[in-house]
Image (cartoon, helix red, strand yellow):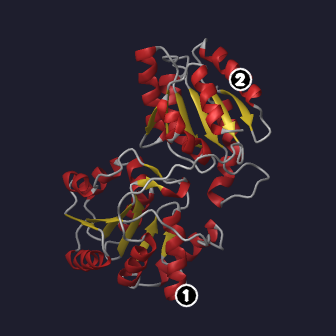
Amino acid sequence: MKASMFLKELYRCGFDTIAGVPDSTLKQLCDAICTEAGAYLKHYVTANEGAAVGLAAGSYLATGKPACIYMQNSGQGNIINPLASIANEEVYGIPMLFLIGWRGEPGIKDEPQHIFQGKVTCKLLEDMGVSYAIVDKNTSIEEVCTILQKAMENFAINRQYAIVIKKGTFEPETKYKWENGFTLIREQALQTILEQMYDKAYFVSTTGKISRELYEQSDALYGNHDKIFMTVGGMGHASMIAFGIAQADPNRRIVCVDGDGAMLMHMGALAFLANQAPTNLIHIVINNAAHESVGSMPTGYSGHTYTQIAQACGYSKVYSVDTKESLEKALQEATINQVLTMIEVKVALASRSDLGRPKESAAENKKAFMSAYRTTK
């Protein structure tokens, strides 16, 4: 199925607003939204999936027309509260359509963070009282029309509807290409961070390519990655995991290597961290202004700096860097100052085509990190 045809069918059925968080399963759909469909659909990349539910609710209140929300199934957790306490027919009864990329589909090989989520994807919808249909590469546009008619029947009684989309459903069309204007390569920046800090600190890294690149760079430099806790799921929570480790022993230096899209998803953590002011935490934000791991669509805050936000929240020191030399200097100063510090590193949209994935399971990596943390000082 062509994603462009799918979007035209949505528009024909009355949808003119679409919002959400990009997903690799929906890459072709996201490409089509940002190219052809941009002419007739109002599109918003929100900070997280729950925010998209809020946007859809407001849009409906103003127009009486349901909006469409797209997401990876990992985002279901973020929509549960506003879905249950705002949109549900027993509360305000606000109809909306969910397009959910099905990672971790049972029987399909996928990364560890998607396995359990994939098992419960449909059950979560059932538990939330959301009727749904499943589509795949064999679904015809005529069948999509029938599915959307069923969705509208649910909208008529103030309920929501979901379309669960399997991997490979959409065929490639025109790719959306966007550049952020930065030149520092992320993997080079991560190598610099490891070279400066690996013998001095323990690391918590965010989900996506950042963790994968740290994994490979650490193995190449030191023959292990035991001092890195790779947060392969739970997008947006790496900084709070890092704080949980940091508060346990103020004498241990903790480095959180975050992503701009991940930090944006739960930015309230900045205010909490600033209030706690851990002196042993360095918060590094790798900013490429995009959700690169799932297709390089710009975030809803692309083109802006995060250091001013961190400073306004109360971070003691902030740095914004875009070269290897300025990164090295910021790391050296952060090590000496020993106050809550943010280092924003502006990097290009680029990664190796042969970038690997962790060979160990998530549980094995957890065990290695805990062992390293408990046996070294």
Q: In the image, what residue occupies the spot 22% across and 79% down?
A: 336
- Label 2 secondary element: helix
Image coordinates for residue 172, horizontal then vertical, percent? 66, 48
Q: CA distance from mark 1 to mark 2?
A: 54 Å
Q: In the image, what residue occupies the spot 47% across and 27% down?
A: 56
Q: In the image, what residue occupies the spot 52% across and 17% down?
A: 93
* Residue type at the position of mark 1: Gly
Q: In the image, what residue occupies the spot 53% across and 85% down?
A: 220
Q: Which residue is mark 1?
A: 223
Label 2 near label 1: C-beta < 8 Å?
no
Give the image quarter of residue 290. Answer: bottom left
Quarter holding the C terminus is bottom left
Q: Residues within 10 Å of mark 2 (few under 14, many from 20)?
A: some
Give the image quarter of residue 63. Answer: top left
Disc nearer the start of the sequence (1/2):
2
Image coordinates for residue 368, horizontal then vertical, percent? 57, 76
Left or right? Give the position of 249 relative to 315: right
Q: Residues within 10 Å of mark 1 (few under 14, many from 20)?
A: few
Q: Nearer the viewer, residue 317 or 376?
A: 317
Q: Which residue is mark 2?
A: 145
